[in-house]
Amino acid sequence: MPDTPVPEVDQGITAPGSNCIPASTERARGLVTRVLDGDSIEVVIGNDSFRIRYIGLDAPGIIPTIEWQGPQAISANDKMVSGQFVTLIRDVSDADANGLLPRYVVVGNLFVNYELIRQGYAKAASAQPDTACDINFLQAQGEAQVAILGVWVPTPIPSATITPTPTITPVPTATLQPVCDCRANLTCNDFSTQSAAQACL
């Protein structure tokens, strides 16, 4: 089976929001093999695998807990890049403290970093020294906020479960009547039955 040819790196990127991408920095072409979360992916370049972190944004996650819009951010990232050849552009940093490569990511005519923010799946997050697109990302975030998209949709407040207070129904109490008044001078004629007379006397 022949190898799939790797498309050449696109030097003239015209995707919306991409006018901020440095023109003179290192670029590479890689195949996205796995979406790690809302703001990072794994790519293969040649025979090597690299973990890429999108520059300039912070997407909600699902680990260790599911954050508001976390599953949606991962799904959006997956739809944009999974199985696609992407162009990876370095700003200043080569790698971050966690060993991920901070990069601007472009697929076709889509600037992924910018689109995730513009569609509300991530918030703009400046990280020195990789700041070439900070202004564009803040503008994209403004669009998402005005449109109330993704992470900008108010977090639903759990509705309180109202447990009805049980109504206490009073149990009627029997009024105890004495069988007879033993202080009275009673005769058999005072009773309607023999058993009533015996109970009293």
Image: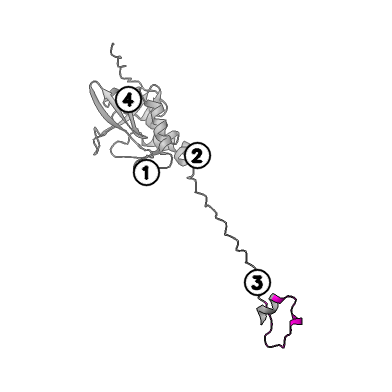
Outermost residue on the right side: it is: 189
Q: Is residue 151 above or below residue 33?
A: below
Q: Which residue is mark 4?
A: 32
Label of residue 174 in the image: 3
At x 39%, y 35%, the residue is: 137
Label 2, residues with CA under 10 Å away: few <14, some 14-19, many ≥20: some
Q: CA distance from mark 2 to mark 3?
A: 66 Å
182 relative to 21, above or below: below
Q: Is residue 62 above or below residue 49?
A: below
Residue 106 shows up from this direction:
yes
Q: Examine the rendering and report whether any part of residue 178 can be seen.
A: no
What's under tag 3, amino acid-wise? Ala
- Of mark 1 and mark 2, the one earlier in the sequence is 1
Residue 65 tag number = 1
Q: Is the Cβ of the residue at disc 4 closer than 8 Å to that at disc 2?
A: no
List the residue tagged with mark 2.
148
197 falls in the magenta region? no
Q: Amino acid at mark 2?
A: Ile
The residues colored magenta run 177-194
Front residue of 195 and 182:
195
